[in-house]
Each structure stands twice: as C-alpha cells, then as structure tokens.
C-alpha cells in the first residue's frame, strides 16, 4: 500500500486473576478474566524500506527519543512485524509509529495492545489476508496477553493466559484507573508470589482459583456483585514489593469506589464505580488526593484490535 493504515487496541483490567503453581516451563497456570476498557494505543503503518519504529505519548518521553518504551526490535511491535512478514512470506518493509495513551509498565497490557494493533494494521498494509486464527497464533507467540488484546471484550484466559474464550457481559462497568509511582516488573511480582507461598505467607495451591463468581457477576450486570467477586492473586506480592499501593487502594475505597484491586501485576489500581456519573466523580476525587500520578475514567467491555477508518 502507498497510504497509511491505522489500528488501535485497548488496555485491559484483570477482574479475576487466579494463579496456580509454577509450571515446568517457567510459567504459571492461570484462570483470568480479562476486561478490555476504553483506553487505547494506536499504531500507524506507512511505507518504508526495512522496519523502523517510533513511539510517542504516555510515559515515553520525546517522540522518537529515549524513553521507557524501546524503539527497536526488542519492542513487541517490531517482533510482531517480523513474525507476520515471515509467516506471510512478504518483505518486512514498514515504518511504524506507536501513539501511547495506555500508561507504560502499569499492568494494563499496553505493550500487548501495541503488538495486537500492529498485527491488524500490518495485515491490512501488506495485504497478507491472515485468518483470525493465524493472527491469534502469532499473538500467543508474542506474549500471554496479546491474544486477548486482539479479541477484546470480556474473555476467560487459561494456560498462561493466551488461551482466550469470550465471556458474555450483561452490561457495561465503569472504572477509574489510578497509577502511582514507578512501574512494577511482572516477573518480579510472580517471583514474589512464589517466595511468599514457599515461605508460608500465602496458602499453597494446587491450581488457579476458579473464575465462575466473577463470570456470574459480569453476566448479571450488577456492579455490586462484580465488586464483591474481584480477585487478584498477584495483589499481595505487589503490595509486598510496593507497600505504598495500600494507600492507593485505601484512597479509592475512601473516595467511594464499590471495590478496588491492583490490576494484573500492578501498579495500577482499578476502582469500580456504580455507574458512569459515579466514575466521573470518583476520578475527580482521586485526582485531588495526590496519591496517583495518572487518573483515568474508563468503561468496558471495549472492542479488541481494530482498524481505524
């Protein structure tokens, strides 16, 4: 193609994250319920010789300059381009630009969203005509959260999270995302979970906690039921590594959230509101506390990776 192709993909909140024991392959068996929310990164693809990548926006510093998000082949977007070109047998020629609104290293799967959007945009740009199943296979090779970023909506993730099955939601839920301090390393949080379990500070488990209570709450459409069912096995180790997150969780509930939890491996706190107006009020309240460096009101479910007209 001679013109640009644009795609976007959403952030996610894990409304349930049950983590089993460490597997022989170094991953943990998961039962997680993903919820895509209305906060999107955008990937634009233009003609280029070879691959190039620029990143701008939330948490990245100056466009094209040094920042927390790499602009080379260590970025999932670059790897997505190489994988799709290899699968389709086309030259890996494209200039890619990532515009970030999803905060970096926040437990919201921003990097996975970028990779999913890149797969969708490059499939259209190169005319590869990849089947959805092919894109999902490539997504799983890129990372555990990338398949969900393609699918969007609400889904149950099993395996290491890469096996996704859609879940019916009875309505929209409204959230305020609060990010405080620096990012948390996902491997470090999982490692802390293993250490806490081995030391007896957390119960030993034979498998991940079942997701049925959260799935039932989502189907009912009741915000109160959903708030009561929220679960994250990574919350305790995240709090152990970042004790200041206890203050962030307390600030959310003190401000009127139905419930609040650490999203994924953190450090984002996802605070559930009763409705859209409640989320707007909650966001304003939390923005004024000084606890969070970034506060966003969002809702879900949101669509997965899609082309933008």
Image: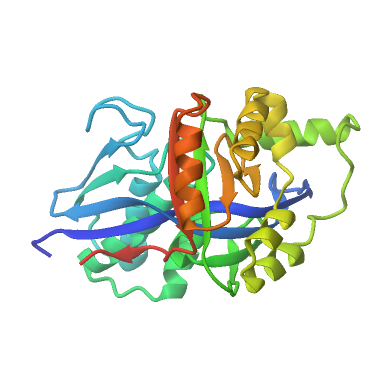
Q: Is residue 173 above or below residue 101?
A: below
Residue at (30% x, 75% y) in the render:
129
Report whether 199 appears left or right of 115: right
Q: Quadrant of residue 104?
A: top left
Q: Is residue 107 above or below residue 4?
A: above
Q: Nearer the viewer, residue 291 or 136?
A: 291
Q: Nearer the viewer, residue 23 or 169?
A: 169
Q: Residue 307 in the image: x percent, y percent?
A: 28, 65
Q: Is residue 62 above or below residue 302?
A: above
Report whether 160 appears left or right of 149: right
**Outermost residue, left side:** 2
Quarter containing the C terminus:
bottom left
Q: Residue 181 in the image: x percent, y percent?
A: 51, 24
Residue at (43% x, 43% y) in the render:
296
Q: Quadrant of residue 266?
A: top right
Q: How many marks?
A: 0
**Is residue 241 among the parts visible in the rendering?**
yes
How has the structure been colored for display?
rainbow
**Is residue 159 among the parts visible in the rendering?**
no
Q: Residue 94 in the image: x percent, y percent?
A: 20, 52
Quarter containing the N terminus:
bottom left
Q: Quadrant of residue 131?
A: bottom left
Report whether 164 appears left or right of 288: right
Q: Residue 79 in the image: x percent, y percent?
A: 38, 48
Residue at (66% x, 72% y) in the render:
220
């Amino acid at each position: 193609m001679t013109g640009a192709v644009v795609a976007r993909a959403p952030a996610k909140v894990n409304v349930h994250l049950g983590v089993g024991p460490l597997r022989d392959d170094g991953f943990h068996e998961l039962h997680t319920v993903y919820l895509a929310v209305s906060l999107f990164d955008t990937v634009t693809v233009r003609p280029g010789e070879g691959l190039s990548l620029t990143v701008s926006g939330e948490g990245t510093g100056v466009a094209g300059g040094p920042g927390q998000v790499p602009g080379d082949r260590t970025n999932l977007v670059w790897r997505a381009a190489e994988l799709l070109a290899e699968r389709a047998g086309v030259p890996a020629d494209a200039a890619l630009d990532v515009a970030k609104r999803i905060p970096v290293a926040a437990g919201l799967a921003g990097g996975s969203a970028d990779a999913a959007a890149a797969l969708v945009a490059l499939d259209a740009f190169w005319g590869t005509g990849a089947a959805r199943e092919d894109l999902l296979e490539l997504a799983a090779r890129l990372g555990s959260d990338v398949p969900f970023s393609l699918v969007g909506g609400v889904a149950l993730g099993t395996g290491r999270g890469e096996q996704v099955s859609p879940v019916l939601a009875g309505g929209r839920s409204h959230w305020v995302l609060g990010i405080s301090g620096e990012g948390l390393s996902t491997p470090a949080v999982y490692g802390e979970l293993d250490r806490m379990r081995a030391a007896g500070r957390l119960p030993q488990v034979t498998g991940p906690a079942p997701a049925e209570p959260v799935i039932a709450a989502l189907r009912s459409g009741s915000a109160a039921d959903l708030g009561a069912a929220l679960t994250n096995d990574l919350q305790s180790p995240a709090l152990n590594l970042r004790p200041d997150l206890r203050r962030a969780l307390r600030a959310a509930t003190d401000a009127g959230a139905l419930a609040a939890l650490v999203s994924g491996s953190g450090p984002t706190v996802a605070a559930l509101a009763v409705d859209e107006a409640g989320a707007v009020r909650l966001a304003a309240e939390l923005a004024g506390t000084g606890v969070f460096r970034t506060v966003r009101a969002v809702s879900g479910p949101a669509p997965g990776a899609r082309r933008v007209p």
